[in-house]
Amino acid sequence: MRFCTPITRRQAMKGLAIIGGTLLAGDLKSIVSASQTSAPTDRFLVEGKGISEDYSIPHLVRKVFEAAGGIEKFVSPGDVVVIKPNISWARRPELGANTHPEVLKAVVEMCLEARAKKVKIVDHPV
């Protein structure tokens, strides 16, 4: 396949339609098969109650990872972990335009506790 050959807009739209249809058909198949089995086990819900006396961002981050099966499900000893937070906007954390610094710190600490070899934080500012 040659990737440097230009294509027309019509060819691009046709290709996207085929890909979209294939993905939709595959997704419909998984929806039908999921409806015939028991409840999915890969989903979870973490409830928070906003700011209270015992409110702690690191605690809530830990609860999320615990609900997802623990940080060990994502990080193995010796892994090099790359975290891509959303930190592109010059806004205060309270505005929710960026990943809260305490959330980022908690995730890095959990990766290190799971004995990651190195944790890198990368982003591409706008």
Image: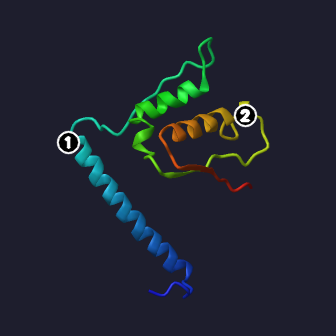
Left or right: residue 92 versus residue 69 is right
Label 1 packing within 10 angstroms: few (<14), some (14-19), many (20+): few
Q: Picture coordinates of residue 68 (x, y %)?
A: 41, 36
Residue type at numbered disc 1: Gln
- The location of residue 37, given as percent across then percent down, is 20, 40
Pointer 2 with pointer 1, Cβ within 8 A: no
Residue drawn at 56 percent across, 78 percent down? 9
Q: Is residue 106 above or below residue 6?
A: above
Q: How many marks?
A: 2
- Say whether residue 121 is left or right of residue 111: right
Which quadrant holds the N terminus? bottom left
Write the residue at 42% across / 40% down. Answer: 72
Lateral position of residue 48 relative to residue 30, left or right: right
Q: Regarding mark 1 in the picture, which secondary structure is present there?
A: loop
Frontmost of labels 2 and 1 is 2
- Decide: is 21 above or below 106: below
Q: Name the residue under label 1.
A: 36
- Give the residue pinned by disc 2: 93
Residue name at image x 35 percent, y 65 percent: 22
In the image, residue 52 sits, relative to residue 75, either above or below, namely above
Q: Which amino acid does label 2 sit on?
A: Pro
Q: Is mark 2 on a helix, strand or loop?
A: helix
